[in-house]
Amino acid sequence: MSVPARLAAFAALLALTFGGAVLVGGAIDPTSEAETSRGAGSSHGAVTSHADEEMSTMDDHEAEHAHDAAGTATDAQDAAGTATAAHGAAGTATAGGDAAGVEGLAVSDGGYTFAPAQTFFTAGQPSELSFRILGPAGDAVRAGYELESERELHLIVVSRDGRFYRHLHPRRDAAGVWSTGLTLPSAGVYRAYADFQIDGERHVLGADLFAPGQFTPRPLPAPRPTASSDGYGVALAADAVAAGGDATLTFRVTQDGRPVADLQPYLGAMGHLVALREGDLAYLHVHPDETSPAPGAIRFMADFPSAGRYRLFLQFKDAAAVHTVAYTLAVPR
Ligand SMILES: [Cu+2]
């Protein structure tokens, strides 16, 4: 996208952000949304493609608001000026540290676009999320997905406060439309990640989903090395955890204090781990260690790109059921 087009897209984003906030309600501060967009401009894809997402879901009512906001040309112009500065900074950041291996911050990247059919949901109501993955030519990808952890595509949905987590496997139809049941439990903003691989390259694209209403985010729990779910206790031993280093995360699953020696494979490994960075919910690369270090133990290698806190979601299978435990992990400098 050319620079003028990008600026126009950013201005449109601001217009939509301010306009759309009226619909979302007073719970979400439109000013801070705009700040977030600007700050998250560490890749300009995040800014421009966000606008695309808004466009695709914009109905007539929203369009009206957008038009009103866009009418204040001076504001838009000023905002565009800011966008230029953000773009400059983003260029530097990309050149310096894109190798950090975070993903999921952009709705469109590497030629592929995550295109949800709808991004607004009613809190607590069972709904259907459908989406397409658009390829470099702009049409839905219908073939060529490569199995990754036994599936063509993994869909992760997390609340923006890092408290709610869902790992789903949507079905794909012949037209390349993926769909899955989804219930957003309470009002708020959610991040959906589509994790898939094509031509040997993995893509994790992210889009925001909304459930209008009174949003009461909760802080992340303080870091603790143990978690429990469904009667299982899971202890986390984190070795060599530091910003920019290769950390080893070993989870030991116990039941009544004894190791669960016969964990069942889940998605081709002994467990599945998703690690998200606090602040931007950047999606990290983690790799399961194929060899279990001990009965009931599951090991992953993770590369934490920066100091700070991360939210870890571990899933494992036992007694024919998948169990999920979550951790807050502090990564020192
Ligand atoms: Cu999956």
Image (cartoon, rainbow, N blue to C red):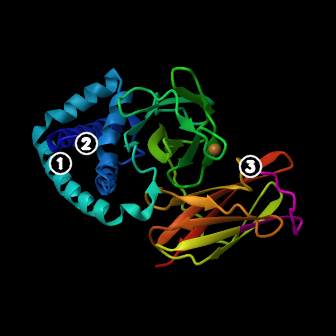
Instruction: Choose top left, top right, bottom left or bottom right for residue 261.
Output: bottom right
State ligand 1's quadrant: top right
* Whether residue 100 is visible: yes
Mark 1 or mark 3, which is nearer to you? 3
Q: Closer to the camera, 240 or 332?
A: 240
Q: Earlier in the sequence, mark 1 or mark 2?
A: 2
Span colored in magenta: 251-266
Element under disc 1:
helix
Element under disc 2:
helix
Whether the residue carrying mark 1 lies under 8 Å from ligand 1 is answered with no
- Mark 3 = which residue? 266
Horizontal placement of 195 versus 234: left or right? left
User: Disc 1 to disc 2, how far (Cα)?
Assistant: 8 Å
* Whether residue 223 is visible: no
- Mark 2 = which residue? 14
Instruction: Based on the picture, tell me whether residue 254 belongs to the magenta stretch.
Output: yes
Element under disc 3:
loop
- Mark 1 = which residue? 79
Judge the density around disc 3: few (<14), some (14-19), many (≥20) Cα neighbours within 10 Å.
some
Instruction: Choose top left, top right, bottom left or bottom right for residue 184.
Output: top right
Q: Name which residue type carries label 1.
A: Ala
Residue sitting at x 54%, y 36%: 145
Q: Closer to the camera, 97 or 41?
A: 97
Residue 265: mark in rendering: none
Asked whether the residues under the numbered discs 1 and 2 touch, taking CB atoms below 8 Å apart as contact, a structural biologist would say yes
Q: Closer to the camera, 162 or 260?
A: 260
Question: x, y (%) of residue 155?
Answer: 57, 41
Please tell me whether residue 301 is drawn above or below residue 128 in the rendered image.
below
User: Disc 2 to disc 3, how far (Cα)?
Assistant: 43 Å
Please tell me whether residue 53 is drawn above or below residue 241 in the rendered image.
above
Judge the density around disc 1: few (<14), some (14-19), many (≥20) Cα neighbours within 10 Å.
some
Asked whether the residues under the numbered discs 2 and 3 touch, taking CB atoms below 8 Å apart as contact, a structural biologist would say no
